[in-house]
């Protein structure tokens, strides 16, 4: 079969792949603890599901909505952004998509041409580089310091005449790194000076811990905000991964192009999910805070335990998202494997714990462990990893 060059070079998502394998093993009766995917384990809050049930009961299902989302949802998003960020967007500056993943996909389709370069920190979430490649662009992973952050200095080493876009994801997947306001200000100013556009992927913005404050590029003044496309959604903060609602907010010029692409690709996100998302954004955010506190407790429990695991080193305690990203080079030599991918394989088959290879994020020698799982499961998982490592010591 002949496939397009695009299809030939795309790699399936490693995080989805690991999780599917773990789920298949669980179906086969193997007691695997799946810490492979970023999927909150909480049930979607009742008032949100109830809004969807009512939408079905009132027959709000047999029509297409505008491709870029219901006007009421855009209004709710604009209010949410104003409340959370203190920044104002008109509803016409918002597009709703089938998850933040689709929002990112259409932005990249709208902006990136063959050979255009997109800067992203190393490590970065798996889909950025693949989405850029699918558009014919070149993902450029920018070296980071021990704190996994890019700076104007490191960005300056990576920028070329083909650079078009910079992606900042704070809190960051896979490291849990959170940028401060002054760091974002400096990066934003650098990008404006270089006439680059930015994506602020704020999908984990509500999940920051231990007195950390969340800031976004769009809060760094009008010039930086105008050069930034804000991406967010309901998956992580409201435990709504399955509903598939994300959004982007940007200057009208970008929104118009994105909407044209959406109108020929996804049509609209599921109508019922859009009504659920309205309830999520309009809710008093209490349920979000309850889940945030649960994640914080897990981080504070699991981080010191994993730090004591032989061969696992976490350079800095994460401040947000729900991932730990230990360096495992020493663990690899203890076990006698050459790559972190092999270590992941051995941990899945022998310790029955599913993790993701750092190589998927552009950083081999590391593993990603999601703590979007129950506290007891997390403790058992670390115990299993410790027993596995002890066997080779
Ligand atoms: N951005 C980052 C950094 C993510 O980790 C994810 C999901 O894992 C997404 C975007 C996509 O989220 P959604 O479920 O809204 O498509």
Image: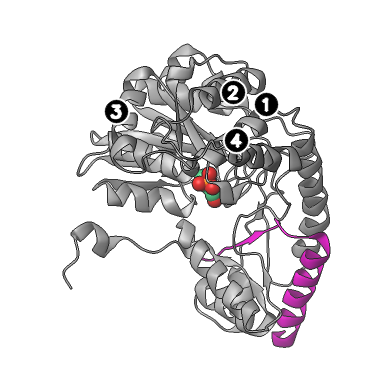
- Badge 1 marks a residue whose secondary structure is helix
Q: Quadrant of the N terminus?
A: bottom left
Label annotation for residue 58: 4
The CA distance from mark 4 to mark 1 is: 20 Å
Observer-nearest of 268 and 259: 268
Q: Residues at badges 1 and 2 in contact (C-beta under 8 Å)?
A: yes
Task: Provide the residue designation for mark 2.
Answer: 76
- Badge 2 marks a residue whose secondary structure is helix
Instruction: Respond yes or no on whether mark 1 lies under 8 Å from ligand 1.
Output: no
Foreground: disc 3 or disc 2: 2
- The answer to whether 162 appears left or right of 390 in the picture is left
Task: Provide the residue designation for mark 1.
Answer: 282
Range of residues picked out in magenta: 364-393
Task: Provide the residue designation for mark 3.
Answer: 257
Foreground: disc 4 or disc 1: 4
Choose the circle earlier in sequence order: 3 or 1. Answer: 3
């Amino acid at each position: 079969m002949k496939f397009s060059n695009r299809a030939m070079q795309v790699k399936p998502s490693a995080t989805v792949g690991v999780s599917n394998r773990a789920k298949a093993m669980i179906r086969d009766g193997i007691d695997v603890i799946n810490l492979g995917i970023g999927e909150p384990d909480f049930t979607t809050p009742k008032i949100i599901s109830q809004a969807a049930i009512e939408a079905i009961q009132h027959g709000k299902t047999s029509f297409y909505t505008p491709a870029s989302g219901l006007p009421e949802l855009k209004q709710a998003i604009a209010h949410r952004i104003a409340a959370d960020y203190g920044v104002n967007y008109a509803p016409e500056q918002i597009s709703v998509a089938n998850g933040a993943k689709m929002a990112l996909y259409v932005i990249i389709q709208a902006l990136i041409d063959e050979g255009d370069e997109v800067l992203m920190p190393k490590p970065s979430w798996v889909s950025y580089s693949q989405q850029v490649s699918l558009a014919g662009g070149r993902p450029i992973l920018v070296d980071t310091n021990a704190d996994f952050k890019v700076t104007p200095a490191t960005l300056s080493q990576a920028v070329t005449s083909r650079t078009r876009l910079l992606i900042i994801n704070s809190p960051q997947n896979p490291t849990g790194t959170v940028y401060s306001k002054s760091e974002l200000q400096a990066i934003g100013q650098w990008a404006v000076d270089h006439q680059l556009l930015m994506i602020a992927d704020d999908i984990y913005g509500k999940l920051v811990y231990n007195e950390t404050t969340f800031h976004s590029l769009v809060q760094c003044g009008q010039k930086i905000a105008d050069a930034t496309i804000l991406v967010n959604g309901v998956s992580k903060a409201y435990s709504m991964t399955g509903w598939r609602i994300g959004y982007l907010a940007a200057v009208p010029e970008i929104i118009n192009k994105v909407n044209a692409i959406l109108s020929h690709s996804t049509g609209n996100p599921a109508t019922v999910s859009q009504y659920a998302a309205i309830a999520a954004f309009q809710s008093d955010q209490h349920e979000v805070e309850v889940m945030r506190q649960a994640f914080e407790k897990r981080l504070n429990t699991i981080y010191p335990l994993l730090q004591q695991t032989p061969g696992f080193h976490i350079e800095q305690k994460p401040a947000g998202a729900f991932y730990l990203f230990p360096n495992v080079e020493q663990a690899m030599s203890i076990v006698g494997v050459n790559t972190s991918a092999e270590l992941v394989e051995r941990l899945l088959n022998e310790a029955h714990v599913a993790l993701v290879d750092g190589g998927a994020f552009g950083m081999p020698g590391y593993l990603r462990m999601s703590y979007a799982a129950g506290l007891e499961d997390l403790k058992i998982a670390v115990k299993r990893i410790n027993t596995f490592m002890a066997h080779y010591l």
